Amino acid sequence: MKKLILLSLVSFSLFLTSCSKETMIKNELDGEKWKVVKITTTTGSTSNSTAPDAEFYAFDKDGGKGTMTDGTYSAAFTWSVSESTVTLTFTNSTSYTVTKSGYSKQTWERKYSFFGNDYTEVTELEKQ
């Protein structure tokens, strides 16, 4: 009986922990504007970093919608969070894994292939 209670408590704790990360990320994005401060793209042993001047992600409050702007271009997207993955959907779905999450800074990572090459893109954001 004690083992059953202990197993139930451990399972419930794991459930709360996994939900809290998702809820935390949602709360950090919901209704906020984030500036992209650095994007690092790596393929093989080659890395390239850029610091966009005016790239922002604005997340609508309670709507799962948002807008990305880069100074001259603007695009609407929908967004969702599942565990530690933020999915932005423009005309196609782009999923980022949140590797660092905080109240004022986040780091997102995504992997993709392009013309037979595998890339890793790390995006650093700061809350505005």
Image (cartoon, rainbow, N blue to C red):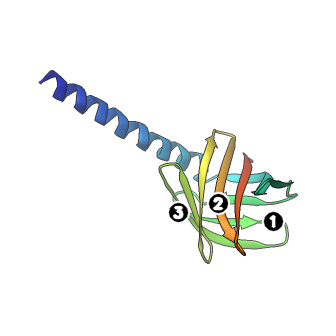
Residue placed under numbered mark 2 in the picture: 111
Q: Residue at x 79, y 53 (%)?
A: 45
Mark 3 / mark 2, whichever is N-terminal = 3
Residue 34 relative to residue 88: left or right:
right
Residue 86 relative to residue 51: left or right:
left
Residue placed under numbered mark 3 in the picture: 63
Q: Residue at x 66, y 51 (%)?
A: 108
Q: Secondary structure at mark 2?
A: strand
Q: Residue at x 65, y 65 (%)?
A: 112
Between 62 and 53, the residue placed more toward the observer is 53
Residue placed under numbered mark 1 in the picture: 70
Q: Amino acid at mark 3?
A: Gly
Q: Amino acid at mark 2?
A: Lys
Expressed as whole percent of the image width and height from the top left, the position of residue 50 reads 86, 56
Say how many tags the image has.
3
Q: Secondary structure at mark 3?
A: loop
Instruction: Give the foreground label among 2 and 1.
Output: 2
Instruction: Give the foreground label among 3 and 1.
Output: 1
Expressed as whole percent of the image width and height from the top left, the position of residue 55 reads 79, 60
Q: Residue at x 62, y 44 (%)?
A: 99
Expressed as whole percent of the image width and height from the top left, the position of residue 68 reads 71, 65
Instruction: Give the foreground label among 3 and 2.
Output: 2
